Amino acid sequence: MRFIFSNLMKLNKYFVIDFDSTFTKVEAFDVLADISLQDHPEREDRKKQIIQITNQGMDGSISFRESLEKRLNLLAPSQHHLPALITKLKGSVSESFKRNKEFFQQYSDNIYIISNGFKEFIEPIVTEFGIKPENILANEFKFDKDGKVIGFDVENPLSANGGKVEQLKKLNLPGDIYVIGDGYTDYEIKHAGLANKFFAFTENVERENVKSKADHITPSLDEFLYLNKLNTAISYPKNRINVLLLENVHPIAVELLKAEGFNVETYHAAMTEEELIQKIKNVSVLGIRSKTQVTARVLEHANRLMVIGAFCIGTNQIDLKEATKKGIAVFNAPFSNTRSVVELAVAEMIILMRNISDKSTKMHKGVWDKSAKGSFEVRGKKLGLIGYGNIGTQLSVIAESLGMKVFYYDTEERLSLGNAVKCKTMNEVLEQADVISMHVDGRKSNANLIGTKEFSVMKQGVIFINLSRGHVVDIQALRENILSGKVAGCAIDVFPYEPVSNDEEFMSELRGLPNTILTPHIGGSTLEAQENIGNFVPSKMMDYINTGSTSNSVNFPNLTLPILKDAHRLIHIHNNVPGILAKINQLLADHGINIVGQYLKTNELVGYVITDINKHYDKEVIAKLRAIENTIKFRVLY
Ligand code: NAI
């Protein structure tokens, strides 16, 4: 660090940074208006006037000083408004500034804040980042004895037109000056010949007249630091990482990825293979739902792709083997709709036990059939669960709270929750349950898991529910058992063949059967589930990009990693052949590099090694690590 610092001093560079909408996401006066005019009867009217006056000041129809006076009159601020304003502004610091706190601390001698705002609220925000109070150039309030703002220091150049230019002249900094800001007055410093470069900062607002004048447009501070080779917090600016989100993924996902600083592009539909091949070349992060086919051909062209997020449960639309071989991690949302499926199962159990489906159909036909015959409570009944995974276990807990006795069978060793009773065989469950609910996964060997033989061991009048996968139940056998009365009611959400679109007719031997609820594979389809998916998948993808963590990845060895502290993290993905770890460690040892943590996991195709090393290292070693035979992908996190 010291080395970089002295290097900079030699370079004599100064960074002049704007405050409103640059250092913070907001304009401080807007926030102040919300506070000082909170209970004012003319609040809305005054806010409108303030906007008009700001615009007049900007277009030159009144002087800046006049605009400042008029706005302060309308705002009527007092000393006692300041703590609330400061708290709000502290919570509104731009995301990329927060990420790069270290930059401000490291180069504090070379950083100036310049603003037409006021020191009283700027100083508490920026000094927390290590910026020196004497390097803050801003206006100052004048208060009366009661703390009311009665004006400002008119001697301060920043209270007048061209204030930023005047201030810079006075400063007379002895080196290259780089200005970063979102406004025209920031550009004016460069225009006046007082700065070498002007960087238009667009993280919070974008103004075309400012962008068109800039030497560089920087969508975040990361980009500014990267361009000037000053980056310390992150290895590569996120705005240079292209994210492509297809099939209208939930807006929350778009928001989350944009807030992280990525360059996000969205598309409302799936893309064809050809379209995706064209597009994928520059994409590092791909988000899809179930319709986009990520084939081996697509992946062949995906040389920058690091991660694919499937905003759904299934991942068979992705060629997982090819993705793995190319070192592309895939994530999905396996639990985001668990609760939705469970709630539907609970509702259906109750509805079927009361024969409501038939009763409701009759009512629509005008038949009043009031009777308690064949209607039961679920309380005290035995629920048999086949498959005790995410859904099975959650249903188990809720069913118990309804007073049911739960029995389950799973091929894997699964811990029993609550008072649920584990059974050694499936038949043990089938023989005693009043309600049977299927929650196994869709593996091929589960085809016709429930057929004639299995129905024969069930109790007379059993209720049968399948919300898992269509091929798990022999539909013909189910039909026969409904017609014979052995099965008193059933609810089926998934079918061996399902229509590909809403235009296709649904064909099934189950249509028209008594006490039979048929639903179009909507067990997990709720708005809450969609929102959960929109939150979950981006969080997994960002974790992977930011820390290398692969927990819950569908195709990568799962590693949950600690947050990186005072170290560099080397992320190495390689073909799973023997001896790679030894080669990595030998190289590091040869260069005298100290390993502070190391994690390795493999699957049948790839090995995933994370090595945290202490901060000082020889750059040459990176090239050598990349060159190790069988390396698929390699990246460094700062
Ligand atoms: P999971 O993978 O957490 O649990 C499945 C469980 O079934 C595992 O514990 C597994 O060991 C067990 N299993 C597999 N084969 C078995 C067998 N032959 N006998 C006994 N146990 C067996 O899956 P999760 O999340 O609980 O989902 C369960 C099913 O629900 C899946 O088939 C999934 O596709 C389906 N699903 C359906 C939805 C819908 O809209 N209807 C929505 C979400 C999931």
Image (spheres, rainbow, N blue to C red):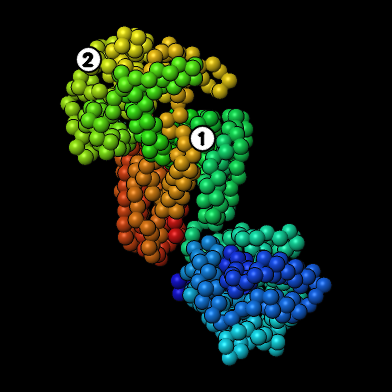
Mark number, residue 457: 2
Q: Residue at x 29, y 25 (%)?
A: 376
Horizontal side, residue 468 vs residue 432: left or right: right
Horizontal side, residue 151 vs residue 337: left or right: right
Identified by mark 2, the residue type is Val
Which mark is first along the chain, 2 or 1?
1
Q: Residue at x 42, y 24 (%)?
A: 493
Q: Are marks 1 and 2 in contact (CB under 8 Å)?
A: no
Q: Is residue 124 visible?
A: yes
- Secondary structure of the residue carrying tag 1 is loop
Query: So how many labels did they put on this image?
Result: 2
List x then y, in percent, for residue 575: 38, 39
Q: Quadrant of residue 220?
A: bottom right
Q: Residue furthest right?
A: 61
Q: Quadrant of residue 112?
A: bottom right
Identified by mark 1, the residue type is Arg
Given this view, does label 1 or label 2 mark the residue nearer the observer?
A: 2
| Nearer to me, 482 or 304 | 482
Quadrant where the C terminus lies?
Answer: bottom left
| Nearer to me, 174 or 149 | 149
Residue 513 in the image: above or below residue 393? above
Could you classify mark 2 by the number of other residues whose Cα lies within 10 Å: few (under 14), some (14-19), or many (20 or more)? Answer: some
List x then y, in percent, for residue 227: 60, 62
How far apart marks 1 and 2 lie (CA) works out to 40 Å
Could you classify mark 1 by the number of other residues whose Cα lies within 10 Å: few (under 14), some (14-19), or many (20 or more)? Answer: many
Looking at the image, in which quadrant does ligand 1 appear?
Answer: top left
Residue designated by label 1:
289
